[in-house]
């Protein structure tokens, strides 16, 4: 059995530091000798671009093409889409095609577990897999939550951010109930502000 830990960085609120945390946490773990895979599960491809791939739409093998293979019941080769970065982390990149895939997921068989099927293919190669989610509670985020052993929720210490968390925590709890998974809900405050 694999000892790999799969962690989803999620919050449906935008701009709270999900991608920044994914990059920094991933590189820090790699510097400690861990084998790390970063998965860009956001069609904005911010994680892919943060790691230096400035034209993600030119990539032919991405998370969306791999997930499409799972949906179509084609042979799945996750390895072919993985990029090796100089900082010592691997990246499963994304691009704008992921937004089209999210629509196609709606009618897919076992639609919550398509990402989990992809991850299971490569889990044995890694100590930690970090999934950078998009700012929504759509099918891709549900896939990330279903694939994750634990969830990290970067958030800002603001009233409206805290209200948004109620909805997210409810989704996590529904998944824990339905999929029988044990999730560790880490709430982690980003962007502390100094008040005078
Ligand atoms: N701890 C921090 N302190 C100050 N600024 C931060 C911190 N973390 C991230 N930022 C900045 O906040 C902005 C949003 O960060 P980031 O893109 O990581 O958020 P995100 O949650 O991934 O956004 P999205 O929801 O659009 O994917 C960026 O400009 C980033 O540099
Ligand atoms: Mg992001």
Image (cartoon, rainbow, N blue to C red):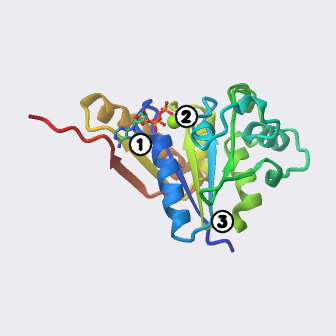
Q: Is mark 2 within 8 Å of ligand 1?
A: yes
The residue that mark 3 highlights is: 126
Task: Name the spot of residue 131 as percent of width and height, x first.
Answer: 58, 48
The residue that mark 1 highlights is: 169
Residue at 17 percent of width and 38 percent of height = 194
Say which quadrant the N terminus sits in. Answer: bottom right
The residue that mark 2 highlights is: 134
What is the CA distance from the residue labelled 3 to the residue labelled 2?
Answer: 23 Å
Q: Which mark is first along the chain, 2 or 3?
A: 3
Q: Residue furthest left?
A: 196
Q: Residue furthest bottom?
A: 1
User: Which numbered dot is residue 102?
Assistant: none
Q: Residue furthest right?
A: 74
Compared across the picture, whether 112 is left or right of 170 comes to right
Is residue 172 or residue 5 the one in the foreground?
5
Q: Are marks 3 and 1 in contact (CB under 8 Å)?
A: no
| Res 143 seen here | no
Say which quadrant the C terminus sits in. Answer: top left
What is the CA distance from the residue labelled 1 to the residue labelled 2?
Answer: 16 Å
Q: Image height check: is 86 above or below 161?
A: below
Q: Image height check: is 117 above or below 3?
A: above
From the image, state whether disc 1 or disc 2 is nearer to you: 2
């Amino acid at each position: 059995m694999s000892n790999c830990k799969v962690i989803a960085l999620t919050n449906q609120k935008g701009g709270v530091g999900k991608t920044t945390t994914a990059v920094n946490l991933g590189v820090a773990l790699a510097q400690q000798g861990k084998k790390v895979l970063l998965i860009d599960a956001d069609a904005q491809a911010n994680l892919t671009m943060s790691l230096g791939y400035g034209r993600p739409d030119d990539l032919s093998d991405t998370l969306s093409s791999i997930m499409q293979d799972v949906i179509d019941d084609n042979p799945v080769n996750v390895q072919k889409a993985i990029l090796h970065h100089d900082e010592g982390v691997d990246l499963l990149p994304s691009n704008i095609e992921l937004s089209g895939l999210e629509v196609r997921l709606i009618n897919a068989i076992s639609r919550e577990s398509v990402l989990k099927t992809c991850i299971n293919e490569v889990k044995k190669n890694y100590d930690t897999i970090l999934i950078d989610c998009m700012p929504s509670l759509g099918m891709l985020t549900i896939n990330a939550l279903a694939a994750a052993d634990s969830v990290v929720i970067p958030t800002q210490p603001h009233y409206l951010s805290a209200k948004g968390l109620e909805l997210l925590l409810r989704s996590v709890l529904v998944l824990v109930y339905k999929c029988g998974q044990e999730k560790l809900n880490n709430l982690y405050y980003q962007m502390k502000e100094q008040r005078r």
